[in-house]
Amino acid sequence: MTILVLVGGVVLLTVAVAALAWPLLRQREEPAVAEATAAQIAVADPLAELSERRDAIYRAIKELEFDYQVGKVSEADYQAFSAQLKAEAAAVLREMDALEAAAADPALDAAIEAQVAALRRQTQTASSPASPQAAPLPSSAQARFCTRCGHQAQPGDRFCGRCGAPLRFP
Ligand SMILES: [Zn+2]
């Protein structure tokens, strides 16, 4: 019985505090979100910044739902704010997905490696003492690529230098 009274009291107190705090929080949070968007440009770790923004939006949604449940926010206001917050959360999640995809795209990594390897070969060819006319590439040997991984093959190679697949060319 005592516990029930105690719990009831705590719940009433929480509702009262939330009801008083909601307009204050709302006034403080709206400029804060705008500031976060501007500050994001200068932030070194945009993914951490985005995850903070996402968490802030989730907290705001929870507060809004609570206020709606206790009757502090009208149905129309709840629907409007809720839709706005969920759209913001979706935008942040899309930005996070784009960042994560760019950071961990294996196709992109492979493309960069291939570019670096091609540049390295160009540098080696340029710095070699042989004159360009001494070793012209036969036209049939130009632009040969591994059919499995796309790695560019060297003239005379019978196996891919990267993945080891046998090279078959017409
Ligand atoms: Zn290969």
Image (spheres, helix red, strand yellow):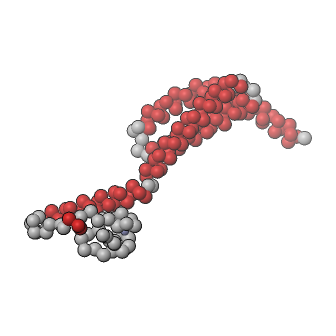
Q: Is residue 89 left or right of residue 141?
A: right
Q: Quadrant of residue 129?
A: bottom left
Q: Quadrant of the N terminus?
A: top right
Q: Position of residue 11 (x, y in %)?
A: 78, 35
Nearer to us in this view, 148 or 67: 148
Asked if residue 104 is positioned above or below residue 27 in the image, the reply reads: below
Image x and y of residue 57, in percent: 58, 37
Q: Quadrant of the C terminus?
A: bottom left
- Nearest the viewer among 43 and 7 is 43
Q: Nearer the viewer, residue 129 or 67?
A: 129
Q: Residue at x 41, y 57 (%)?
A: 107
Rendered position, 150 above or below 103: below
Q: Which quadrant of the structure image shows residue 162?
A: bottom left
Q: Nearer the viewer, residue 73 or 159?
A: 159
| Residue drawn at 46 percent across, 51 percent down | 101
Look at 60% across and 35% down and name the residue there: 86
In percent of the image, x 52 and y 32: which residue is there?
Answer: 33
Left or right side of 16 for 144 = left
